[in-house]
Image (cartoon, rainbow, N blue to C red):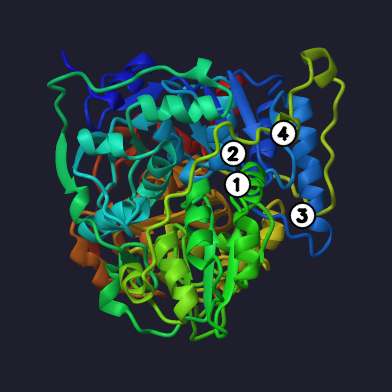
Amino acid sequence: MARTVAHKLIGDHLAWGDMVPGEEIGIAVDQTLTQDATGTLVMQELEALGLDRAATQRSVQYVDHNLLQADEKNAEDHTFLHSGCRRYGLWYSKAGNGVSHPTHMQRFGIPGATMVGSDSHTCAAGSLGMLAIGVGGLEVALAIAGRPLRLRMPRIWGVYLDGELPEWSSAKDVILEMLRRHGVSGGVNRIIEYHGPGVETLTAMDRHVIANMGAELGATTTVFPSDDAVRSFLRAQGREDDFRELAADPGAEYDDHEHIDLSRVEPLIAAPSSPGNVVPVREVSGREVSQVVIGSSANPGHRDFAVAAEMVRGRQTDSSVSFDVNPSSRQTLSDLTKAGAVLALINAGARIHQAGCLGCIGIGQAPAVGRNSLRTFPRNFPGRSGTKEDSVWLCSPETAAASALTGVITDPRDLADELGMEYPRPEQPDPATVNTAMFVPPLSPEEAREEELVKGPNISALPDLTELPDRIEAPVMLKTGDDVSTDEISPAGARALPFRSNIPKLAEFTFTQIDPDYPQRAAATADTTGHIIVGGENYGQGSSREHAAITPRYLGLHAVIAKSYARIHWQNLANFGVLALEFTDPADHDRISAGDVLVLDGLRDALASGGPLTAVGRDSGERYELRHNLSPHQVDSVLAGGEIPLMRRELS
C-alpha cells in the first residue's frame, strides 16, 4: 500500500495500535527536546519517576527561553537543569547557544527520526523529515524513561504546493496563508504533510518556518519530505552522513487535501491578537509602527536576518521605530557576522539582542501600550509580549524590514517600487560556523550516578495529586470564551516565568489576564469543594506548558467543561488528574454562568464504564449533558489523580 511520509514515520516507530484516525497508538521516541521554561518540571518529574538513565537515543536540554537574569531565580534554574543533565544522561546546550528548535535542527535533527519536546514548536523539526511532536513535560519525561508516546492517530492532511514564491513573498507568508484559510483550530487532530513540486523550491530553513507555525493551526505536527534541500542543509552543518531520503510513495492517499499555488502568495500579516487574524499587508498599510522585532523560532534562518540586513543596508530606520534583532542561534549570529550583515543592521539603527527566545515570550522588548509592534514571531496572543494591552502583528522579515524603514506598516513590494530596491538573495553559509563546544555531552552512567540534583530555594516539589472524587459539587469559578490560550491561563513574561519551578508562587499568576481575582478565589476552594472552569471552543490553544494544567489543579480545579480543546492542553489536564469534559450540545455553554454550582455525581463508575455524564445546577436544577474523549488509559490517569500517581500505583 502506497504510504505518505507521515505514515512511514509512524509505521516505522509504531509500538502498538492501528494507524486508524482516532485510534490510540504508541510511538517509540528516538529524541527529546526540553527548554528552560518547561525543563525544570521535566527534571522534577524524572526525579519523581525514579529514573536512573535516559533511554532515548538522544535527549537535549536547552536554556534558550529566558536568558534574562534580573535576580538569582533564572540562574538557579539553569544550574538545576545542568545538574539534571549530568544526573540523568542528557546533553546540555550552554546558555546563549540559541533557540532550541533551529539549534537542534542544526546539530541533532535526523531525517526519519521521532522526537517529542516540551514546547509546542517542536514540530519545526518536521522540516527535516522528522516526526516531531510538542507535548507536555510529563510526556517528555516518560519518553526519556523509555515509554512510547500515547497519541490518537491523526488524520493526514496533504497540502499540495506548486509554483514558486514571487519576490517579496517568503515562507512566512505561506504559513500565514494557511492560517488565513483555516484559522487557529484548522489543524486539530491532523498531521500536515506538504508535498508536490513546489516543495522543491523551498530550502530546509524555509520549511522550518512553515512547520514551526503549524502549531498555530493546532496541528499535531507538520512533516516535509527529506530530499536534496535537506541533504544540502546537513552538508553545510557537517552532517551529510545523517541524511536519509524520505518521500511519499507515488499514489499515496491523504485523508484531507489542500492546494497552494506558491506563485500567487502575497505578503500577509496577522493582526492583533491572534495568529489566525490574517490579512494582506496592503489592506492595513499606512498604520503607524513603533517597534519591529526580527527573530524567534518562527523565522530563525540565516536568510531571514540577511534579507532584512540587505534591505536596510546603507539606510536608516524611521526615528519613531525601535528596531530589534533577536538572533535565533549563536551559529546564525556567527554566520551573519562573517557575512557583514550584523554591521549593516547596526548601522541602520538595529539593537542586537542575545541569541534566545526573549521577546517572543515577553522576556524583554515589551512594546508600549496602544502602539503597533511588528514581529516575525509565531504568536500574538493578548499579553504574551509582556504588555497587557499590546498590539502585536506577525509578519515576514521582508514586511518587518520595510516597515522599520518607513515607520508604518508597509508592503515590501511597494517600498521596492518606490526605492528601486532589488529583492535580496543572500548566499547561504556553506559550510556553516559550527561550534560543537557549546554542547556538553552526557556523563558516563557510572559518573552520573554520583551526581546530585542542585536545587535552589525557588524550586518547589511537585504538588500532591489526589484521586478524582466520585462526586463534585463545586462552583464555576471562571467562564471563558473561545480560543483561550495557555498564555492566558499561565502567563509567560518576565514577571511570571522566573517562578516556573515554584508551583505555589506561579499559581498566583493563573488566569490573571482574564480575571485578576481568580487565584485568591480559587485557592479558597482547594481544600474544600474545589472548583470548575467552563470554556469555549479550542480551549487551551498555544504553548505546551503544563503549568497551565498544574497551577489551576494546585488551586483546586477538578474539572473543565468546554466546547472543545486544543490537543496538548487536553492531554496535560489528564496527565495531572483534571477531568476534561465537553458539552454534548455546545449551546449549553451559554446557559451556565460564573458562580453557578454544578453537581457531577457517580463520576468514577461513569468514567470507568464509558457511561453518560450529566452536570446538574444545584440551585437551578438545569441539566447539562456531557461527554469525554478520554482513552481507557487517560481515564485511569484521571481517576488516579494524574499520570505520576498512576505509575506509582502500577509499580507498587
Q: Is residue 271 left or right of residue 48?
A: left
Q: x and y percent of residue 391 in the render?
A: 45, 78
- Residue at mark 3 to residue at mark 2: CA–CA distance: 21 Å
Q: Mark 3: give few (<14), some (14-19) or many (20+) Cα within 10 Å.
A: many
Q: Amino acid at mark 2?
A: Thr
Q: Where, quadrant-wise, is the C terminus in this rendering?
A: top right
Q: Amino acid at mark 4?
A: Tyr
- Residue at mark 4 to residue at mark 2: CA–CA distance: 12 Å
Q: Is residue 394 visible?
A: no
Cβ atoms under marks 4 and 2 closer than 8 Å: no
Q: Is residue 349 visible?
A: yes
Q: Which residue is mark 1?
A: 99
Cβ atoms under marks 1 and 2 closer than 8 Å: yes
Q: Earlier in the sequence, mark 4 or mark 1?
A: 4
- Residue at mark 3 to residue at mark 4: CA–CA distance: 16 Å
What's the residue at 54%, 41% (across, down)?
102
Q: Mark 2: give few (<14), some (14-19) or many (20+) Cα within 10 Å.
A: many
What's the residue at 44%, 57% (across, down)?
378
Q: Secondary structure at mark 4?
A: strand
- Residue at mark 1 to residue at mark 2: CA–CA distance: 6 Å
Which circle, 4 or 1, is nearer the viewer?
1
Q: Is residue 300 left or right of residue 617?
A: right
What is the number of the mark on residue 86? none
Q: Which residue is mark 3?
A: 74
Q: Secondary structure at mark 1?
A: loop
Q: Amino acid at mark 1?
A: Val
Q: Which residue is mark 2?
A: 103
What is the number of the mark on residue 92? 4
What's the residue at 43%, 23% (across, down)?
111
Q: Earlier in the sequence, mark 3 or mark 4?
A: 3
- Residue at mark 4 to residue at mark 1: CA–CA distance: 13 Å
